[in-house]
Amino acid sequence: MRINRLLSFLVVLLFTAIVMVGAFGTSWNTVSELPQNPADQSNIEGIGMLIFTHYVAPFEVLSIVLLASLIGAIYLAKGEGNR
Amino acid sequence: MVKTALKEFAFLIPLLPALAFVITFFFGRKMSSGGAIVPILAIAASFVISLVITLRLLANPGEVISQSYSWFAVLNIGVLIDPLAAVMLSMVSFVSLLIHIYAVSYMAGDPGEARYFAETALFTAAMLSLVLSDNILQLFVSWELVGLCSYLLIGFWFERPSAAAAAKKAFLTTRVGDVMFLTGIIILTSDLLKLAGGFQDGTYLLRFDEIFSYIPQLSALHSNIFGFEVSHLTIITLLFFGGAIGKSGQFPLHVWLPDAMEGPTTVSALIHAATMVTAGVYLVARTFPMFIAAPDSLMVIAYLGGFTALFAGTMGIVMNDLKRVLAYSTISQLGYMMLGLGLGSAIGLEAVGISLFHLINHAFFKALLFLCAGSVIHAVGTQDMRELGGVRKVMPITAATMTIAALALAGFGIPGTSIGTSGFFSKDAIIEAAYLFGEHSNNWIPYAFSIAAALLTSIYIFRLIFMTFTGKPRSNYHGHESPAIMTIPLSILAIFALVFGGLTKTGFMDFLKETFANSFVNLNIGSLAALGRNQILEAAGHESLFVQWLPMIVAIAGLAVAFIIYYLRIIKLGPLASMKNPVYRLLYKRYYQHEIYTEFFSLGIVYGIIAFLSQVLDVIIDSIVEGIGILTVGVSEELRKVQTGVIQTYATAVILGVSLLIILVKLITEVL
Amino acid sequence: MLPVASLLILVPLIFAAVTFFTKTKEQAAGLAFLGSLATLGLTLYAYLNFDSNTAAMQFFESIEWIPLLGAKYSVGIDGVSMPLILLNAIVIPFLILYSWKEEREAPNRFYGLILTMQAAVIGVFVALDFMVFYIFWELTLIPLFFMVNIWGGEKRAHASYKFFIYTHVASLVMLLGIFGLFYASWQQTGVPTFDIRELVGQFQFLGSGLLRNAIFLSIIFGFLAKLPVFPFHSWLPDAYTEAPTAGSVLFILLKIGGYGLFRISLPMLPNTGNPELMITVLGLLGAFSIVYGALVALRQKDLKRMIAYSSLSHMGYVLLGSAGFVALSVSGAMFQQFSHGLIMSIMFMSAGAIQTGTGTRIINNLGGLAKKMPMLAVLMMVGFMASLGLPGLTGFIAEFLVLAFSYVNLPGFVLLALLAIVITAGYHLWAMQRAMFGVYNEKLGDVRDINSLQVFSMAVIALLVIYFGWNPNPVLNMMITNSEAIVSLVAALGV
Amino acid sequence: MIPLIFYLGLAALLFSIGLYGVMTHKNGIRMIMCIELMLNSANLNLVAFSSYTDTLNGQVFAIFSIALAAAEAAVGFAILMAIYRMHDKINLDELNILRW
Amino acid sequence: MENLMFLAPEIAVAATGLIILLIGVFMSPRTKNVLGYLATLGVLAALVLTVRSFGTEATMFSGTVSIDALSQFFKLVFLTVSLIVSLASIKYTENSDHTEEFYTLVLFATLGMMVVASSNDFILLFCAFELASFATYALAGFEKQNPGSLEGAMKYFMIGAVSSALMLFGISFVYGATGTTSIPMIAENISLLAESPIGIVAVVLLIAGFGFKMALVPFHMWAPDAYQGSPSVVSSLLSAGSKKMGFVAAFRVFILALAALQPDWQFAFTILAVVTMTFGNVVAVSQTSVKRMLAYSSLAQAGYIAMAFAVMTPMALTGGIFYTLAHAFMKGGAFIAAAAVVWMITTQRTGDLQVPDHLDNFRGLGKRMPLAALCMTVFVFALAGIPLTSGFMAKVVLFSSAVQAGMTWLAVIAILNSALSLFYYARLVRYMYFLPPEGKKIGLPFPYAAALLLATAGVLVMGLWPEPFLQWAMEAAKVLI
């Protein structure tokens, strides 16, 4: 198990290194200035607008996702004793 | 031209016996005597047709009967009856007829009677077809069919392991020769194709006239074999001769012939004495123009023929089996015939005449010898000479006819006159030709061979006569004379053996001279003109008396030796003729040829190669294929363990995979 | 005119489908026999309406199938395929008769598979589109796989896998070559097509010599492995030996390797990058197979295994004749296929009869069977003699044509092949002598001769062997016409 | 201004920690927690990018992703409960009747 | 207002799922069998709607949903699988108390796959992906009394969760570099991603995410366990359906969005394709559980399909897309046949009950259930690529495209693999037909028979007359190029 841990650690280290190299090696396009005071302007409204207009399809799908996982979770978690 | 009617009947000669074969094969069992009457009638008809044609040709010199039908591809089936074929046809159908008649009695009561007659009918058909074929391929086909019949008939009593083994041996040994023959045909075909520049419509590639017309070009083609420039014609003719060696039991492929005596005696008489074994001689005679143009091949034939004549004779004198003695005698006589042909380099095309003359005469007296032997065996029930003796008393006709045959074989007659057995004229002609050859080329070896062989011939045949017919019975047997249906053929043959040679001596040769002299063969080989200048017919009688008498002297000497030893029994051969004497043992064991062939060739070399090929190569190839399968399963068994069943491992694999894939892709895209 | 080519596939297939649903042995065999007779009738109809003086395709049909890939369902018959169809159509009815009285489980499947196989093999022969060709090519595997596995000998599983996978690999390699040909031609002409004749005709214009070599070699590999010849024969002895008699005969009738050689490889051969080299290699493989098969057969103890190796030896002639590349040598190779089918059918039927009669195939355990099985002995003799190339029987004609005319181009290899003739005679006679002649081996108990149906079916085939040995023209002429067409494509080769 | 790369580095680290957890822990609950960590590090990335590119898609995505993570956890725990009922333990490395 | 008619198939499936859920509550276990037929009808309706919608194109919901030939083709695939699975499940869920849950989940999973096929935005794609995943997690563990089923579900879930995290991580980088989640927009703003090292990282992370569904080595580890452990009908759905979801997502994302990074992912897919098909086939050789064997065979098939990415010619894409449909029939049918055998073994209580899909339990199937054996034979021969089956045609197009593109070596590897696969398929046939049965003959229940015949018909029709399917596949491929 110890060896496994070591191995896992090395693998994760490798992965981290790769992602880091990728992330650090990229000159990201960023806005020049972040808003100074985030509290000033809320983007909740924007997000809400997006969700209910542009992303209405994912939203609908998400509802079904929740329903599906609900059914699945209930079914699986339910004991069979009450039958 | 010969009348069309005759032409149309020519193809019936082999076809009637073939038909007889079919009828006998399917219905023979339901007929009396195995349906023997069908082949007898058919062969009689064939004989009549042959005889009529022969007489016709005799009356109209220079004419041939020739028919060709397309067979397949550029090859044909056809009939060519020239003097050479005509005499062979007549002889074959005649002897075959007599032997069939004889066999009715000889084979009576045998459960396989119908099979016997079917097979001999087939044999006769094939042999006749061989003789009258107008192309080399048909000849080869018939050649193989007679071989098949020989195989079937040797193994006629297949329940006997020795018969089955002998049949196999005969087939295989002759097969070696056949392959050479076939190779010759193949090389010839390909050469002709090249020379003719492809196929021409309307001509059949392998017809003899077609082949002969290309002889000059063929002899001009050369190939380099092991550093020697060899003419293609020489190669082809030697290969043909290879076939003849197998079929005609020449050294070194003669081993099958003595064993072939496992078959019924009638078969030995018909196939292994009179007809089939002479097919080799006939082949060489048939294609003689090619041989004439290839003198090297003729030399080989002469030496090998002469040697075989002598060599077989040496073994003949120690055999105790009645039929085996005759078998070795056959080999020896075939050697004479080959020798006669080989002397063509001295006497030209006339060699065909003298050889064929001996062939025909030999057919009569050898068939007679065998039938007499058969008669003895049939009556007495044993064929070991040591158990016989005094048979003359119970079988006078057989004894008389056999003695005549023996005289013919030994070649008794009075030189310089026309008095003598048929063997005397034909064998003397060959010996004289050998003498001419010696004078011509100063090479006396063939002559020496032929004289020595003549001595041995006389010894062994009279040893046989004396041991069988004179003295006291050496075992308890109950003999009786054979019925008339057997003795009549004996008598007929005896007459022929006695007088045929004397009657036809010059006529025969003249007749055969026409074979290649007519327009059908266009031989314009200038260089060959010199070869035929020693004409034996002219030379006959012009040699010194010694030369004329020498064959007769050695024959009488042989008779005397046999008389002293086996009739008077003055000299006891005890220690000499025992296995302790190495020479005797060598001879008795037939020069260990059987052992050499089976142990050395079939088992040693061939078996070694096979063992190598089969076990090593096949196993290697097979294990490569199987190995891939086994390897895959093995790898699979190991590789499946990657799937440990532990989720953590799975996750590790995913991450490791992602990391490595990124690195790999990065590396490769950087490098490319 | 009937659409014979399609019917020849459909009729056996339909009968096969119905046969699968029969209940009793008699129904199954009878129906299958009817089906095979119908096929025979159709074949004879085709044969009688066939013009053997032209190399052109006859009974041609073509329907669009997959336009996207240019694949069509096109079928037709010419002188290359006609004799092989004939062979199949002739032997199958007698095969069914032969096995009529044998007891076996699931007779409906047995006979159904025979007919399916027939349909598939004929399908290969009539196909003129690579796609159709390949489909039938592969379909021939399945009935045989089932055949060996259900009714085969002891090691049937191993044998059937080996055969199935080995030849499947070879087929796939061939498929790869077909792809190469297809795309190279597509690139060349701008039109996709799988038409065999068109692609073969296009072959010479394609790409570099190397590409053409690669295409040629990968396609011919499929054929050589199916034929098979040395060194691709490993599957053969096992499969032939373990198969039931009918299966062995079906294997024998599976002449698709040689057919592909004539139909596809030979016309391509002169246009490969190194035609001389190819011819040499093929000729060598052919000649070596002849010798090798004979030598290995000599050592076999199992009768069927011996016959299997002898079949390998015979197939060497097909390759040698093809490599000889003279019209008559190619015809000889074609005729060898035809004659081999007939001869080997008899031989395997004999071996099967011996096995059912005595319970063993080991030659040394037999002996003197001729006494107990006289009919079999006669028929077997015909087969064995034909197999060893005795003149007057079909085998000789084929071998003579191959040897005599291949000699023009490949003298050395022909001489090599000639060496095998004596060996061939040797093992045939040895087997015959040990099995049939000599003293009867009493250990075998009371053995009965083959039944009358078996006699009849074997006798008919034996008579055909004799008939075609004397008169090969009914099939040989069309072969010659077509091989002349093949060879004439090739004047450039300079042979 | 905090450079974007700090967020990215943090997210990468969090992700790696989650990964390490999944790879080494035996306990099912801990593993699911580690997966949540990974999902959240991705969310962190999304939000950071959203801010720094001045687009809202990322934040919307993050919201969806959180919802999905919740559902995922629900299903995961349900399966885990079923396993617990059966084996009375949730050590996932002992679940290896299916292997090879 | 959007024209919802374009989404009619999805709506039909979703509605059917909801209706089943609703009315299932009020039904007794006995009458619940009707639900299966209802689901089948719903799927069939959706299938008809999909086929009728062929040829229409639309983008909806602000460009997040794209209805085109590609999505329609894959909807066809998913609905076909769903149809087969629903049909077969009628028997599986017979007399079960949880029929409605089962069918709802099946339908929702199908819905998720269908939405993935038409999603044109990463957010939708991810959500739909997860929908299909969550529904199938629960389905995989549906036999909660069966340790195998739960174990399979757990492994599936764990690796699925890790993979979705990886995918999300990858998407985040793509989003970061391009500033958008919309697939067409990404393609426009790709420059930074294409030039930076993060591009490769993102690509491989996405490959890992999709590769989990496609079951490409080394992201496949869950697949054999989950396929083996799950109820066979669910295995059928997983292997024949949700696997294809990975492919359609990958088609859209890599070819449409990340076209600029083609060298990177093309190379990655080449490696994965070769490794996957080889690993799958080699390991399948030594399997004794038929479902596990089919799982490995499924890996191999995924490897073949992945060749489409490696070759990347129109022909290859056509072949790959065609292959997905072909594989849906073959593998879907094969798992249903396995389901039939498992049903037989468990009801007859004969044979190896521990591993009901053990190869030994297939002994003499040709005699015990002739139809199932025959169909199974067709499926495995199709998987092996024997002609007259869909598998052959698919391989012809796909492998030949590799030759066309000059990647002959890839075709050779694929072909050798294909030959190797014959080994284990033939072994299965041998067990079914050539070994003696252990037990008596029993009738095949109608649902299984119907599903098997449906799949067989699909396999044979695609093999005999592939032209229309090839045309559709080609239309779909045109969307990508």
Image (tube, rainbow, N blue to C red):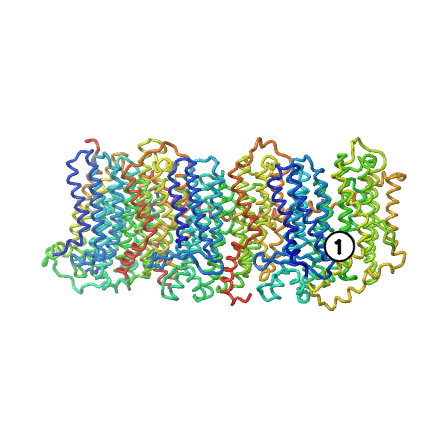
Sort mark 1 into few (<14), some (14-19) or many (20+) by Cα contacts within 10 Å: many
Image coordinates for residue E304, horizontal then vertical, percent: 35, 53
The quadrant of the image that shows the N terminus of chain B is bottom right
From the viewer's perspective, is E340 left or right of B428?
A: left
Residue B2 x %, y %:
68, 59
Left or right of residue E29, residue B187 in this image:
right
Q: Along the line of sight, which residue is nearer the eye, C14 or A55?
A: C14
Q: Looking at the image, is B110 positioned above or below residue C182?
A: above
Q: In x, y percent, where is residue E6?
A: 18, 54
- Mark 1 residue element: helix
* Outermost bottom residue: B526
Amino acid under disc 1: Leu
Q: Quadrant of the C terminus of chain B?
A: bottom left
Q: Which residue is denoted by mark 1 in the rendering?
A: B356
Q: Is residue B168 visible?
A: no
Splitting the image into 4 quarters, where does residue B236 fall? Answer: bottom right
- Nearest to the observer: residue E251 or residue C338: C338
Q: Is residue C243 above or below residue D13?
A: above
**From where the camera sits, is residue A41 visible?**
yes
Q: Is residue B251 left or right of residue B652?
A: right
* Count of numbered circles in the view: 1
Residue placed most toward the observer, B661 or B39: B39
- The picture places residue B619, in percent across and down from the top left corner, at 55, 47
Identify the chain of the residue marked 1, using the numbered disc in the image: B
